[in-house]
Amino acid sequence: MIVEFAGLPGSGKTTLSRTVKEELLSRKNYLDGISIDEPSAIIAEQKSLRRIIVKLGYALLGFFIHPLLSFHFLLVILYSHQNSIKNFLKNHFNGIYLIGLYSRYRNSRQIVLFDQGGLQALWSVFFSSTLGFEEKQKLITRMPGFLMAEYIVFLDCGIDLIFSRLKKREGKQSRMEEKTFSDETVRQIKDDLELIQHESIRRNRDSHTKKILTLDNSNETFLIDNSILIAEKIIEAL
């Protein structure tokens, strides 16, 4: 089972993924020997060169196992009208890398937690896209259903709290930390995520997704409650 945590940078995706893993491990008697993995978080923690090599390996795997799907994602990036060649190449590579990573885990007998999955990749494409809202809405229909997780958890967190958390991070882990945004851009960032959330729910019947949750993750109490709830839902779905 693939579980994706989706939300803006700083919404607590990685932290919640780790607490859910801990909660599941505390209930291992209910897992019937099923293991738990966090591949995207583990890869992100690798040193720069090793991280690039691992991602390149998965990208090659994705390209050779699913060449048509990789080409399909290339078309998504082309239609998205990226604001720079750098972002075009970065988002295309990230998509093929995720195709390879999902291929590795799609049919495995594991619980696989993604803090950076297909929907987060789509949001990243939107972040550097010059398209308007309606064009982005059409673009979502081109997104490969293969990159939809069986279980999706959207994390809701106030935008002021998001930027407060990002300021406390060590180093720049997302493009939202690289510059100051206008109120209009902030609204667009939120609208993009809400669009992805809405369309994910609408497409639910036509994809791999079995369950979608939206949770408030704005403080530590919610974090604990959310990890317990998600662990219980995952165990129920096994």
Image (cartoon, helix red, strand yellow):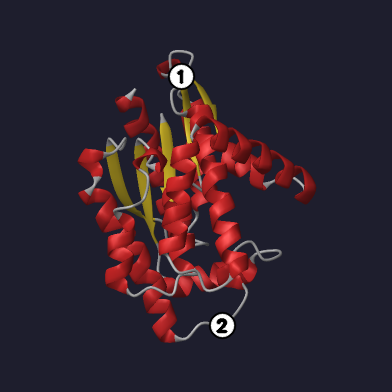
Relative to 109, 174 lies left or right:
right
How many residues crowd mark 1 within 10 Å: few (<14), some (14–19), many (20+)?
A: few
Task: Residue under label 2, please give it.
Answer: 180
> Taking the image as drawn, is residue 8 in sight?
no
Residue 223 at x, y percent in the picture: 44, 50
Which residue is at 49% across, 43% downward? 70
How many residues crowd mark 2 within 10 Å: few (<14), some (14–19), many (20+)?
A: few
**Which of the 4 quarters of the picture holds residue 27?**
top left
Residue 190 at x, y percent in the picture: 37, 70
Which residue is at 32% across, 33% downward? 233
Mark on residue 109? 1
Residue 31 at x, y percent in the picture: 43, 18
Does residue 187 lie above or below 216 as drawn?
below
Give the mark, 2 or 1, whose residue is nearer the N terminus. Answer: 1
Relative to 29, 179 lies left or right:
right
Residue 40 at x, y percent in the picture: 58, 42
Q: Quadrant of the N terminus?
A: top left
Q: Tag 1: residue type?
A: Arg
Does residue 218 lie above or below 226 as drawn?
below
Q: Distance between the residues labelled 2 and 1?
A: 43 Å
Relative to 106, 52 lies left or right:
right
Which residue is at 34% across, 42% downward? 145
**Label 2's element?**
loop
Residue sitting at the far top? 32
**Label 1's element?**
loop
Figure label count: 2
